[in-house]
Amino acid sequence: MTEPRRIAGLLGPTLVVLSVSEAINSHIWATVSVTQTYLAGSLWFVAGLAIIRAHNKWTGGWPVLVTFVGWLAVLGGLFRMFAPEFAQRSVPNASVVLGIQVVLLLVGLVLTFKAYFRT
């Protein structure tokens, strides 16, 4: 199995589960503390750094999604770590959040398909 498929095998299902569970439990985000925002940023940073350390290739095809998601995780994690109050206040309206969750779900489904169902 190639490195992008291996990472996609972890990243795809994770994005699917995160996006669906966040959509189902959207009410809990109203009570998230600054500390929780910082902790989430730390976890996103570490996950993104692990992805780009293992696969930082900007070549064509679907594997570039792996690199792109890794960099988004690093940058989003840093944002939440260095500006947790601003990250908390700058949450867009519910429609934008739902749109982001749908995009993450689609990316997760593509990566899952490429990792597990594509030969």
Image (cartoon, helix red, strand yellow):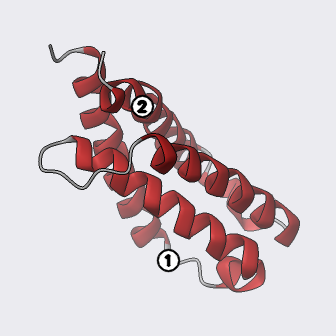
Q: Earlier in the sequence, mark 2 or mark 1?
A: 2
Q: Which quadrant holds the C terminus?
A: top left
Pointer 1: what residue? 93
Kindly report which numbered mark, 2 or 1, lies closer to the viewer in this rendering: 2
22, above or below 2, in the image: below
Q: As rendered, which of 30 and 106 lies closer to the eye? A: 106
Q: Tag count in the figure?
A: 2
Q: List x then y, in percent, for residue 60.
A: 12, 50
Q: List x then y, in percent, for residue 42.
A: 73, 58
Q: Residues within 10 Å of mark 2 (few under 14, many from 20)?
A: many
Q: List x then y, in percent, for residue 101.
A: 42, 54
Pointer 2: what residue? 7
Amino acid carrying label 2: it is: Ile
Q: Residue at the spot x=22%, y=26% of the render? A: 114
Q: Residue at the spot x=17%, y=51% of the render? A: 59
Q: As rendered, which of 14 and 5 lies closer to the eye? A: 5
Asked whether, in this view, residue 77 is left or right of residue 2, the answer is right
The image's mark for residue 31 is none
Q: Residues within 10 Å of mark 1 (few under 14, many from 20)?
A: few
Q: Residue at the spot x=30%, y=15% of the render? A: 1
Q: Residue at the spot x=12%, y=44% of the render? A: 61
Disc 1 is placed on an element classified as loop
Q: Residue 98 lies in what quarter of the image?
A: bottom left
Q: Are marks 2 and 1 in contact (CB under 8 Å)?
A: no
Amino acid carrying label 1: it is: Asn
CA separation in Å, label 2 and label 1: 32 Å
Disc 2 is placed on an element classified as helix
75, above or below 89, in the image: above
Asked whether, in this view, residue 53 is left or right of residue 3, the answer is right
